[in-house]
Image: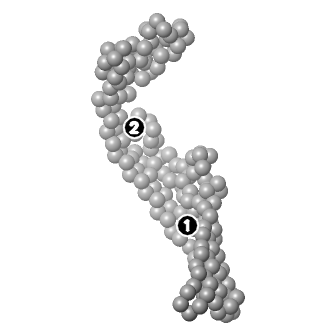
Amino acid sequence: RINKAFAISGGARFVYQYQYAESVLDQVEVYHSEYGGWQSPESYLQSVAVDDRLDVLRQTVVTALAEAYGADATNAELDASRAGIGFTPIIGIHIRPSDRVNIGLRYEHNTAISVKTTVNDGKDALGLYVNGEEFRSDLPGVIAGGLHYDLSDKIDIKIGGRILLDKSADLNGRDSLI
């Protein structure tokens, strides 16, 4: 507190981010009545590849996809976790220009979080999760404020809001989607 009308505050936030995923995907089948009903994705792509309605280039591409896809690609297991920590500096200002008016402002900096992936027993969802991979998954900064005005002893007005600084957070490429 600087004086009766003005105060400054400071603080920090510790963030522990943890994600765990466990899943099994097996016996995937595709249904298409024109190509024989229910079948594996590999069989479906092989059926499409010999369809006379496709030109040679498309048939070649679909054949390559069928070979690359393979029978094993219909079964995937995932057992992985991702964890990281971060610290956020926070500053605040309180202004009381009169006995009836309070104004509060707060700024929370971006929380930089470096997340590390751990894959258990090689269950990596067909390579979607890479053991030891590190990437950023920040929390965005925040600017917040509020105003409190005592109209009378029984009536007061309060208003507040906040702005998330999403564009300034590093979300490992996902920030372009915001």
- Residue 167 got which mark? none
Residue at x 37% of width, y 22% of height: 41
Image position, residue 125 (x, y; %): 39, 37
Q: Are marks 2 and 1 in contact (CB under 8 Å)?
A: no
* Relative vertical location of residue 28 with respect to residue 121 in this rendering, above or below: above
Residue 2, quarter of the rendered image: bottom right
Residue at x 44% of width, y 36% of height: 127
Q: From this viewpoint, is residue 71 visible?
A: no
Tell me which amino acid carries mark 2: Ala
Within 10 angstroms of label 2, few (less than 14), some, or many (20 or more) residues?
many
* Relative vertical location of residue 57 with respect to residue 172 in this rendering, above or below: above
Q: Is residue 55 left or right of residue 106?
A: left
Q: Is residue 98 left or right of residue 140?
A: right
Residue at x 36% of width, y 14% of height: 34
Residue at x 38% of width, y 28% of height: 73
Which comes before the other along the chain, label 2 or label 1?
Answer: 1
Residue 78 versus residue 140: which sits nearer the camera?
140
* Relative vertical location of residue 47 with respect to residue 72 in this rendering, above or below: above
Q: How far apart are the two marked residues, 2 and 1, measured between alpha carbons? A: 31 Å
Image position, residue 14 (x, y; %): 51, 68
Image position, residue 122 (x, y; %): 37, 39
Q: Quadrant of the N terminus?
A: bottom right
What is the secondary structure assignment of the residue under circle 1? strand
* Relative vertical location of residue 32 with respect to residue 162 in this rendering, above or below: above
What is the secondary structure assignment of the residue under circle 2? loop
Residue 152, quarter of the rendered image: bottom right
**Which residue is under mark 1?**
87
Image position, residue 146 (x, y; %): 61, 76
**Which residue is under mark 2?**
125
Tell me which amino acid carries mark 1: Phe
Colour treatment of the image: one colour
